[in-house]
Image: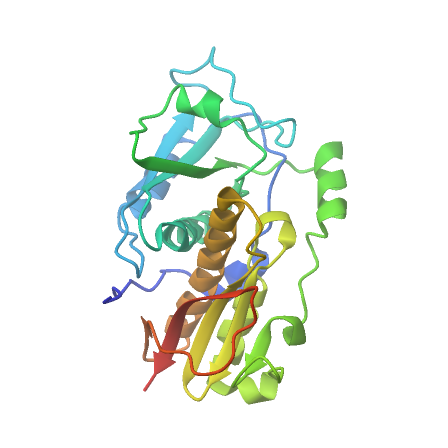
Amino acid sequence: MNFKEVNKLPIDVKETIKKRISTRSFLEKSLTDDDKNKLMDFYKTLTNPFGVDVKVQYISKNKGVENIQLGTYGTIKGAKDFLAITVKDEAFAMEAVGYQFENLVLYATDMGLGTVWLAATFSRKDFENIMELSDDELFPCISPIGYPAEKRSFVEKIMRASLGSKNRKVWNKLFYLNDFNQTLSQTDAGKYETALEMLRLAPSSTNTQPWIAVKEGDNIHFFCNYKNSISDDMKKIKHLDLGIGLAHFHQTAISEGLDGKFEIQDIKFSIPENMHYVISYSTK
């Protein structure tokens, strides 16, 4: 498989990654037409390395769906607008969704807008009633999009505390050197240190961070970490999370001037049962 080149984001990606937070409390107003058009026009320029067609539909409670209930199970307050993501079920579909939409999330963050990935805490049927969705398309996630409220709601405070939103796994839980027997130090990461750190900071469902990276020479091998016994829907979410992490890694690598590419490689070392090889990144 030949992976595609993608454009460098026109923002300071490292600073934006550090600034991005999950927003669940919004001012009760829709985006201005200028902000909506700026965001959606930018989305039309985005692609992903996997060559998968990822679609985003803009849904506004204030324009045409005032009487439609859009359920988020009480987790989101004040949001008037949502972005709904769909994709056909094909190879690398979930990684493509995670990669491409996270690039839009980062751009929205740079605009001063709030977002949060929602994969489980929303009513799909409510949204499907007002969306264009074909039988062969997946509808894995949505995000509210709007202006963050000055104060977080009580529910948001509880969720952030329970999910440990500020916490991220340390390096020796995520990154390895040559195989799965030796952890990777930040010193040994070399030219990949910053890109891997930005991967470490990526958001994921319930903050599980299911990605594992193994550095072998000039190669970084990416794995998705989950038990084979979990449901197919949960596996899809894990691969979507990896796609988000790959966006952070790849866009940082591009901003750092690394001349690399994604490819599928033949992994020679032993892989634990719960580690699922997905893709590698290599530089010259």
Residue 204 pos. (x, y %): 57, 53
Residue 41 located left or right of residue 77: left
Residue 204 higher or lower than 187, as above or below: above
Residue 263 pos. (x, y %): 32, 72
Residue 228 located left or right of residue 171: left
Report which quarter residue 135 is drawn in.
top left
Nearest the camera: 125 or 266?
266
Q: Identify the image quadrant of the C terminus.
A: bottom left
Give the residue drawn at x 47%, y 22%. Answer: 125
Q: Identify the image quadrant of the N terminus.
A: bottom left
Number of marks present in the image shown:
0
Residue 195 higher or lower than 73, as above or below: below
Nearest the camera: 57 or 173?
173
Residue 37 located left or right of residue 220: left
Residue 269 pos. (x, y %): 48, 82
Residue 218 located left or right of residue 214: left
Residue 104 pos. (x, y %): 40, 49
Residue 55 higher or lower than 271, as above or below: above
Give the residue drawn at x 36%, y 60%. Answer: 10
Q: Is residue 113 visible?
A: no
Give the residue drawn at x 64%, y 74%. Answer: 171
Q: Is residue 202 visible?
A: yes
Nearest the camera: 144 or 90?
90
State how the image is colored. Answer: rainbow
